[in-house]
Image: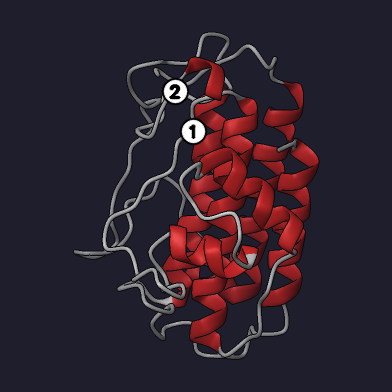
Amino acid sequence: MTAADVEHAVRLALAALRGTETRDWSVKAGSLEWDCWETAEHLADDLFSYAVQLSPANPPLDTHVPFAWSRKRPGGPANAVFADREAGPAGLLQVLEAGGALLTAIVRTTPSTARAHHIFGAADPEGFAAMGIVETLVHTHDVAEGLGVDWTPPADLCDRVLARLFPDAPADTDRWPTLLWATGRTELPGRPRLTKWRWYGAPRSDRRP
């Protein structure tokens, strides 16, 4: 997974969501308890957070870079980044684009030997790229479902995310439904919907046997 993949995923997400500015972004985002605005805002915050986590000369290996996180309401996402509501959905998408550009730049310029803390394993730049991509793909799904927009990302991109982050996912099923299954959003034939799930961000060479 590369910086170009992050850039590509975010551009696809923006292309899918542009043109929805007049729709009601306060509706629930798919199966989430957040609305579409909160979910897109959370995605922008994810991309920003992954970028800043990896960006110090000596990234922390045991905790997050200490940006202050807060919630706009009980049960809402805890973010360091919030979009100005007065800018509307178009402004929100610009914030999302900026977060994607930050992660793209940091992944592109950070040595592959770098590691930084994440709760699912200290990751390298490729791992943070993959995490940013999976967040982009599945949260765009959530928002698109809420807004009534068709969204199916490329199978090859889903396949590489699955290979990098979800080593236990089935390999003989369609890639996009499998990524949705791996992130607890749907079921697969013979496989019920997951109620608990995680990914593995650490490089395979760093994982314990």
Front position in the image: 44 or 145: 145
**Which kind of residue does numbered mark 1 sit on?**
Gly
Rendering coords of residue 8 (x, y %):
78, 53
Q: What secondary structure is marked by label 1?
A: loop
Q: Is residue 30 left or right of residue 69?
A: right
Location of residue 91 (image quadrant): bottom right
Work out whether 26 lies above or below 204: below
Left or right of residue 47, residue 184 in this image:
left
| Mark seen at residue 193 | none
Task: Tell me the kind of residue under disc 2.
Answer: Ala
Report x, y in % for residue 78.
32, 51
- CA–CA distance between discs 1 and 2? 7 Å
| Residue plotted at (34% across, 71% down) | 192
Q: Is residue 80 above or below residue 107?
A: below
Reply above or below: 182 against 1. below
CB contact under 8 Å: marks 1 and 2: yes
Tell how many labels: 2
Which residue was labeled with disc 2? 122
Q: Residue at x 54, y 60 (%)?
A: 179
Q: Residues within 10 Å of mark 1 (few under 14, many from 20)?
A: many
The residue wearing badge 1 is: 201
Along the line of sight, the residue nearer the viewer: 32 or 201: 201
